[in-house]
Structures are given as structure tokens and as C-alpha cells.
Image: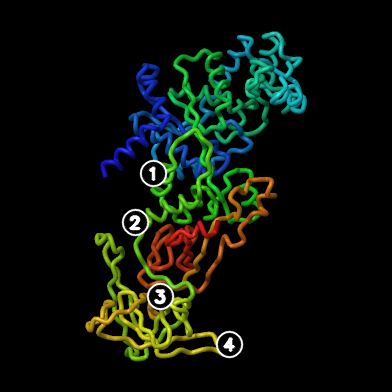
Amino acid sequence: MEDKILDEEKEIASNFIHDLIDEDLKEGVYDHIQTRFPPEPNGYLHIGHAKAICINCGVKEKYMGVGNLRFDDTNPTKEDTEYVEAIEEDIKWLGFDYDNAFFASDYFDFLYECALTLIKKGKAYVCELSPDEQREYRGTLTQPGKNSPYRDRPIEENERLFAEMTEGKHPEGSMVLRAKIDMASPNMNMRDPIIYRIMFASHHRTGDKWCVYPMYDFAHPLSDTKEGVTHSLCSLEFENHRPLYDWVLKEVGLEHPSRQIEFARLNLNYTLTSKRKCLRLVKEGVVDGWDDPRMATICGMRRRGYPAAAIRNFCDMIGVSKAYSIVDFGMLESCVRDELNESAPRAMAVLNPLRVIIDNYPEGKTEEIEIENHPNHPEMGTRKVIFGRELFIEKEDFMIDPPRKYFRLFPDNEVRFKSAYFLKCVGYDTDENGEVTCVHCTYDPLSKGGNSPDGRKVRGTIHWVSAADCIPAQIRLYDRLFKTENPSDESQGDFEQNLNEDSLKILDGCLLEGSLKDIKPLDTFQFMRQGYYCVDKYSTAEKLIINRTVNLNSSWSKKK
């Protein structure tokens, strides 16, 4: 146990972000710690965002600092209050709170003044190259770019043109404001990047006040420093943007600027997180929305029944590093399974019903069977289910001619019905096609509770529901959406060619035990011998819909 604790402490101490923050505090660079999570409200959060949220909130909690939520709403053509509300809901559901909620649009006046500062210093200019010409002038990874013919405009002319852009006197795409840095820089991001562009679009918060909007690489560092963020934690693709982050803060002249630190993003196999591609799945009806339980969105995972604690544990388990890696989806499923094993109450459900008649059980008689809700948590109480002469079991729990080591129901074999009685098969009925339609059994009335007074043993226990007290339901069996590990790999064709045709199977006519008559959306259960299930958010009393969250045991290695 002591070795385990030491290993855990070593793992925590090896978090390089914490190491860097510790150095900053020790050297007096900062006397407090403040982080932020800055999503763009142009879509729904996914599992990768969950990792970023956990990292930022983990830093806040460890150093008893401040953590802000800031919406990067600098592109009004793609953003909407729908996404703002969804993001806030997802973060709250994950179990995190932020000290403040801000918007980049809160700082539009400040950002504009910073742009004017750069113009006055000769560090920014208005450029009239077309987008194609800008790409041509930018150069390549092996060839330097060349200066725009507008790069050396007088400061006064740049001020006038930028004012005209702001007043809406020039059409979209006709001119932009660019930072004047170095067109020969080996870092493409430093080759006079655009920091403002013209957009005639109504903003979800500022309306039509602005027709020029800042670019992310300009707004991001200034917003961080304006808020007092000490450590700007972001994914590794922004590492090459860090020199621009630092350049903006230095040239604008802000004191105590923020420090950007990058970490490796979460890459989960068999999933898709590209907003553009996910939007295509939604629009083409491949999935039934952003919250489809097969999506890697947080709202989709919530609808599928993934506990928030399992997602947090998963993010902790994969850790924080700078190394690119791909995490197996089975690890996430394992975290979900471990969490639900402890928290989900048990119940019985029959997905493919087969009628059982107990020939020697009195007709018209029923009795209550008391069953514990969780074998390891007596504090979760018990429930009562009805037992009677007619029951339903799974079709796969009966065979006429079974193979060896089949410990379920077959002619002349006796099994235990969960928490009820020993039942012995004495016959069966078939239809004109030879399909079994009903199994006839006798029961031992002395074996109530699943134990026989004479000490005889049975080798099989099966679940059941009562015909007199059961609830019809539709059960949806979800699997991974793609059949290839990297659905975004264009060498394997269009990502839609890699869809898993068995990612959803809908079973109608399923039956649940009667004690579940009052279940409500997002309630979760372990259906005995089946797996973990969740009531769908769109389920109603008239049409009960249950989603499979995850199987009882992992079968991931077999599928791979």
C-alpha cells in the first residue's frame, strides 16, 4: 500500500505543468495562480475539451487559485447563444465551477485600442492583398515569404484606413490589418499574421456595433492578460503560436503578461471530434443530433449514461504530457464500468423475451420477492418484484439440445431464478416453424430465496420478469460509431466510409421488472447479466427508451 501511495505521489509530482508553475511561484514571477478555459461557442464540447477542463480546474484547485470560463466569440458567423448555454451545462455537469464567466467580446473596445497602439508604433499595417495573393506572398515551410507592397505605408495612412474599415466603408475581404513582424521567419505564424478582418455579421452579444473583428491569435493573449490569467494552458497545436502570443503582449506593452503552456491533446481512437465533420454527420442524419449517444460530445456521453465522475477519472488516468499519443476507447469504457459498478442500482430486464409457465404454481397467485438494489451497498436498500405463474426469460437462456457447459435452462435441467426459486424444465411448446414459444417448468416451493433445504446445488442462475408485472421498453444497443481506429485518416477514404453499420441496434418488445415503473430520464442501472443502461433523455411514460451505456465486461480487444 505504501508503495502504491508513493507511486501516486510521484505521478502527481511529475505533472510538468505543475512543475513549471512551481518554478514561477518560487522565482516570484507570480504571487497567485489564475487559469481559464476558453472555448469558442461554435459547437458542442467533446471528450478532448473534458481533458482541458480537468487540467485547468485541477491547477485552480491545487494552487487555490482562480479559474475563469471565457467564450472566444470573435467569429460572429459561426457562434450562437445555443452553444454558450450548452457549454455552460456541460461544464456544470462535469462537476466543475468557474469563478467568473467572460466573453472575448467583453474586450472588443480594449482589443481595438491595442490594435491602434500597434499601428501607432509602426507594428501593424492595413494590407489590401487578396486572400490568394496573401497565400502566395506568405511563402512555404522551406521558402521565406515576401513583404506585402502595403507593408511600409505611413502610420497616418494605416490609421485612416483602419478607421474606414471600422466605419464599414470597405467590403469584406478587401483589406485586413496585419502585424508587422518578419516575412522570413521560419515560423509561419510570425509572417505578418492578420490580426483584424472585416465582417458584416451581427454578433450574438454586440449586435451590429462592429464590422471589424479580431483574430484569435490577437485576442487570445490580450484577453488572458486583461483578466489577470497567469498561466494560459492550451493544447499542443498552439505551441508554434506561442512566439506570436508573446510578441503581441510585448509590443502592446502590457505588464505582468500571461505565460502560455502547451500540453498534448486527447486523441481517442474510433472517435471523431472535428466540428466540421461532426456537423456533417448531424446534417446528413447519420446521427440524431450532437447529443447522439455514439458521438464523442460531452452531451452525447451524458445521454448514453456515462457518469461525470468516470470522465474525470479517465482524464486523470491518461495524465498530462507533451508527447503525442492515442488513447484506446476501451480505457474510457473501463472507467465508466468501474464507476457504474459502484453507483448503479441493479434491476432485471429481458431483451428478447421467452414465456415460461410454472405448471405447479397456483393459478392467480402472485407473491413479492424482495431483492437488494446493490450487493455491495446495503444502504441503497431493497425493492420488491412480483413473482407469479407466468414469467419471461431471455430466449438464449433456453436450449433444446445445449452444448457442454451450458448451465442454463434445458429439458430436465434445474436452474435458479434470481432471488426466487429453483425451476426445472419439464417441457416446451413450439410453433409451426419449430421455434420455441413457451417453456414449461415446475418449481420447488421450499427453495424460496434461491436455496434448497436439502442442500442440492444448481449450476445456473438466470434473471426473469413477471408477466403480471412488467414494463415494455425499447432498448437501444450502442457501439462505437466507426470501425477504423482513425476515422479522420484520409488515406482510408472519406470518414463516412468507415462508419460502423452495427453502431446502433434497436430492440422493441423488451420487458423490465415492474419496480422500474417510475424511472425517469438519465436514471442508470445495471441490468443483471446484461450491462449498464440509462434511460434516454427523450424517453416518455408512453414510450420508454433505454440506452445501453456499456457491457458488463470489455469485449474491445476482440473487436479490434
Number of other residues with Cα within 10 Å of mark 1, as a class: few under 14, some 14 to 19, many 20 or more: few
Q: Position of residue 363 (x, y in %)?
A: 34, 90
Give the camera-side residue of 73 and 324: 324
Q: Secondary structure at mark 4?
A: loop
Q: Residue at x 53, y 14 (%)?
A: 250
Q: Is residue 170 visible?
A: no
> How did the renderer colour the structure?
rainbow
Q: Quadrant of residue 525?
A: bottom left
The quadrant of the picture occupied by the C terminus is bottom right
For the residues labelled 4 and 1, the Cα–Cα distance comes to 55 Å
Give the camera-side residue of 346 and 489: 489
Nearest to viewer (mark 2 / mark 4): 4
Label 3 belongs to which residue? 470
Identify residue type, mark 2. Answer: Ser
Number of other residues with Cα within 10 Å of mark 2, as a class: few under 14, some 14 to 19, many 20 or more: some
Nearest to viewer (mark 4 / mark 1): 4
For the residues labelled 1 and 2, the Cα–Cα distance comes to 16 Å
Number of other residues with Cα within 10 Å of mark 3, as a class: few under 14, some 14 to 19, many 20 or more: many
Nearest to viewer (mark 2 / mark 3): 2
Identify residue type, mark 1. Answer: Gly
For the residues labelled 3 and 1, the Cα–Cα distance comes to 35 Å
Nearest to viewer (mark 3 / mark 4): 4
Sequence-wise first label, 3 or 1: 1
Label 1 belongs to which residue? 95
For the residues labelled 2 and 4, the Cα–Cα distance comes to 44 Å
Q: Secondary structure at mark 3?
A: strand
Label 4 belongs to which residue? 433
Q: Residue at x 27, y 86 (%)?
A: 445
